[in-house]
Image (cartoon, rainbow, N blue to C red):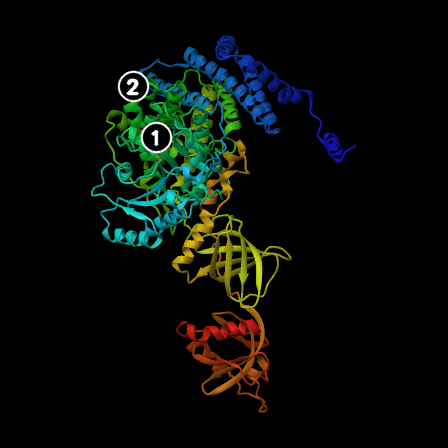
Amino acid sequence: MSFSLFKQSRNRQNRPRRSPLITLLVDRLPRFFDRVLARLGSNHLWWLILLLVLLSIPLITTPLTVRQQGIVAIALILVGQVVVRTEAKQSDKTVSEYFHLFLVWLSLVTTMRYLYYRFAYTLNFDTWINGFFCVLLLGAELYAILTLLLAYFQTIKIKDRETVDLANYPQDQWFKVDIYIPTYNEPVEIVRNTAVAALAMDYPEDKKQVYVLDDGRKYPERRKKLKQMCEEIGCKLLTRPNNDHAKAGNINTAFKTTKGDLVLILDCDHIPVRKLLMRTVGFFYNPNVSFVQTPHWFFNPDPFERNLYTKGEIPVMNELFYKVLQKGNDFWNASFFCGSAAVIRKNHALEIGGIAVETVTEDCHTAFRLHSLGYESVYYDQIMVAGLAPETFASYVGQQVRWARGMAQILRLEFPLLNWKAKHLTLGQRICYFSATSHFFYGFPRLIYAITPTLFLLFGINPIQGLGLETLFYALPHLLISLNANYITYKEVRFSFWNEVFEFVMSFQTGYVTLMAVINPKLGSFNVTDKGVSVSQRSFDWQSVQGLLVVTAIVIAALLAVPFWLLLRPEDAEAVLVNAMWCVFNLILLTAGLLVAFEQPQQRPKHRLLRRLPVTIHTTDQSWPGETVNISESGVLIALDSWPNLPDQVDLEIVGDYGRRAFVAGEIIRKTPISDHQVHLAINFINLTQAQLDDLVLVIYSDVREWYSQKRATLDRPMGSLGFLATGVFRAFRELNTQTSTKVRKQIRATAQLYWEGKFYSGRATEMGVMSLRVELERSTAYSDTTEQTSPLLTPEDLRRMEQDQPFVGLLLSQESTNQLPQRLLAQIVDVEDLSDQVAIELKFPDQLKQKQETKIKQLLKVL
């Protein structure tokens, strides 16, 4: 028997035995459906769908008693849980798709059954006020159900793409690429980082050109710095005499000047990896492809991550869009252009008049027009840029308001579902665009969900007739099975109940701007999201959440009314308890939303990235290999598998994924033991030149094989997610643990003589760094009253004066006491420590003598 056969046999024996039910669900049913669907043509498939709809009608409309509906509800919820748990135990993508389709069908049936029940039995028009709020709540529910159905359509099939290898084409036939970096008022160093990385991208030099498109004519001093920067690094600066149409107008002006076939557009804070062009340009050998979009990824925590203290374990808001929805859109040839990290074919863009200027979301509008001409798009799901997310809650709100206004403008101006001018749009594309442009209308429906249960508890207004257990038995299967269906596709990118928090946070702002955009789509202007902002202390953004505070207060007041209802109207106990549970759920989400506005301080000057890179620590005579734990342009945390005796300042060699190197000097500020043999060194970079900063940017952001957030290890746990949100207030008011610096110096044994006020005092040096030194004197030497001493004595009064005056003193340091040529140094006393059996004196080397003494100090560190 061969080894391979033995190995297979052994694996088969060790594999856990599946139950017959699991085997049926995971293996046999998906294969059966594969065989059936493979034999069906498109016409037969539509007949199959129609048959499924007809069979579902009795399941939707059959009336049941309350008890029967309760049993059915429990059974449906259990089925949903069984399917989710079964799907989680296998890794076959096709099987997951079938489980997802089954849950989508089950969700549609339970949702339609709930809607049938709502229309048939629960509409309350007995008074005008009940009828008014009944219509509002029903409208909110219909919007939510429509959104659910559109999301099911978008994610019915997730499309994954492989890159088209440029090596298959002769290099002289490669496209010429212009790289645009539009900028307005962002700090020049942010623009520089992106431009330096763009210049370093792998692509023939004669076929690429980097342009910085500066629209900041209001800032002449900044423009001078930009011009100097462009000349220094080798890119071109393009300007224009006006700011018409903001970013879209800036790009359209550049279209008329540059000569490339393709244009890579990068926001000025989106630092590209070196392989971006090599992995995206190949798609354009399909002449019908208009643009290739890649994900936007942000290396800094957004306000939700930072203020709710998720520690990177909860997916951020844009992950659902870039990891699921865009791939679902791509299946329908409807992936969106997102304004950055995208390559666009210039002649196709010019065919539609350039980047769209009629709305403030010019990117999606441009994609709509390209698709309307029958062109194709590509979504390539590999993170190719690292950018900056909004760093304050106010900036986040401003960005979301712009997106909400722009999408509503597109819906109002184009109405994708029924736009007869867009003759080449397929039904799938129309539905995907309608889903995107209607998404931001969630504001008012979300507020209606928050207010509805309070209307009953505070004012006796009842929008739902007969609200109680019966309504729950219809509503819970609809809610929980839709949660199960979305869980299969969303479990890595959007945790349960976080979408509700996102919507609550922005409900007032998006509700208002979408309404205004529908009334007048020309209202509003393009706003630039602030970059490079730092939050230094805790603060609460009252202005952005005023409305949310009022709603929260109303919900709390409603909950306080519950005991009075139970005492005075016990016959309404079912309705009271259901509304109370609804209020508690809303309160958890509202509180989490308010905590997002409670700004938490940023504890480092630069954001650290969790990159594992080879690093070598060099001193004057030795080197130690290690690995970075996290790194930024200002510092690094290094893991070493030994405990070296290091000085306080070292030289570092950091290597990127493809071999790019950065050589920098660093100061060790903290040494933390991890195990018996491993230690972490926290190091701040010092004396960085601009060339070294550029090298660091390339190593950290450009020389990247795959960003660590490409795949997420943590999965959604619905109850754990709800518990995390419910306990957010404890994390928001936690005590901030700021890690303090500690002295890290080389341990030495050297003879020391301290010269002060005309006398030499003998001792020994025990610790030494580039900037400081520790000298110890035995207590018997320092305080002895005996007359036979080889050196003068330091009295307690002398030590008090040293500590108070912090005088400059001379030092003679040598390896042996008999050394006739000790090194002479000047230092300043900064502290005197009176220990039980000795006196320790802390000294620092003066900065003004650094150049004169540095060589001597490093020589001593080498030999001592």
The location of residue 220, given as percent across then percent down, is 23, 51
Nearer to us in this view, 91 or 833 = 91
Name the amino acid type tagged 2.
Lys
**Quadrant location of the N terminus?**
top right
Judge depth for marks 1 and 2 and give the one in front: 2
Name the amino acid type tagged 1.
Cys
Name, please, the residue furthest toward the right.
1
The location of residue 296, given as percent across then percent down, is 42, 38
The Cα atoms of the two marked residues, 1 and 2, are separated by: 17 Å
Nearer to us in this view, 749 or 650 = 650
Q: Is residue 390 visible to the viewer in this orientation of the structure?
A: no
**Residue 259 quadrant:** top left
Name the element at disc 1: helix
The residue that label 2 is drawn on is 421
Q: Residues within 10 Å of mark 2 (few under 14, many from 20)?
A: few
Q: Residues within 10 Å of mark 1 (few under 14, many from 20)?
A: many
In this image, 404 relative to 779: left or right? left
Q: Is residue 617 visible to the viewer in this orientation of the structure?
A: yes
The residue that label 1 is drawn on is 364
The location of residue 108, given as percent across then percent down, is 48, 17
| Image mark count | 2
Nearer to us in this view, 794 or 535 = 535
Dot 1 or dot 2, earlier in sequence? 1
Name, please, the residue furthest toward the left.
241
Name, please, the residue furthest toward the bottom.
787
Q: Are marks 1 and 2 in contact (CB under 8 Å)?
A: no
User: In the image, is residue 846 above or below residue 274?
Assistant: below
**Residue 93 quadrant:** top right
In this image, 629 relative to 317: left or right? right
Say which mark, if any, is on residue 540.
none
**Quadrant location of the C terminus?**
bottom right
